[in-house]
Amino acid sequence: MDSTTTVIVIAAVLAAVLLAVAVGVLVRLVRMRRGMRRAGLPTGPKWVFWGAVLYFVLPTDLMPDPVYLDDIAVLLLALRTMRKSLGEQEEGRPGDLG
């Protein structure tokens, strides 16, 4: 293999790994939202969840699509926002001594 082929193979493997990580974070986000809804808990602003999903799916990004770092960041931010709304719900629970 020449050096150009090696670089292309490494770039393709890296893009595949980043895509797998992004899909994994998306699955975690969807599962978390589904679990919160089943438990009757607030899931935070709807636009955060749907905005993150649309950003991941749509081809228009801040970075070209083989680099999924921006997609991962947006999905992690949405996950953090949903967890924060869950934490705020638990703080306001009646009978809480803390």
Image (cartoon, rainbow, N blue to C red):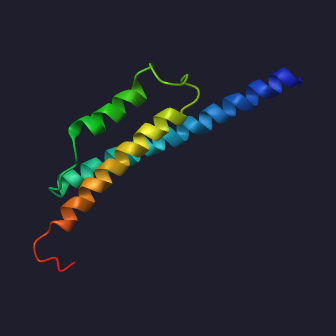
Residue at 54% across, 36% down: 69
Residue at 42% across, 45% down: 76
Side of 11 where 24 appears, left or right: left
Q: Is residue 89 above or below residue 30?
A: below
Q: Quadrant of residue 20?
A: top right
Q: Quadrant of residue 45?
A: top left
Q: Nearer the viewer, residue 62 or 79?
A: 62
Which residue reaches farthest left?
94
Side of 10 where 43 appears, left or right: left
Q: Quadrant of residue 59?
A: top left
Q: Is residue 14 above or below residue 31?
A: above
Residue at 68% across, 34% down: 13
Q: Is residue 52 above or below residue 28?
A: above
Q: Nearer the viewer, residue 61 or 56?
A: 61
Q: Nearer the viewer, residue 84 or 57?
A: 84
x, y percentage for residue 50?
28, 34
Side of 92 where 5 appears, left or right: right
Q: Is residue 15 above or below residue 41?
A: above
Quadrant location of the C terminus?
bottom left
x, y percentage for residue 23?
47, 39
Q: Total of numbered circles in the picture?
A: 0
Quadrant location of the N terminus?
top right
Which residue reaches farthest bottom?
97
Residue at 61% across, 39% down: 17
x, y percentage for residue 74?
42, 38
Which residue reaches farthest front?
98
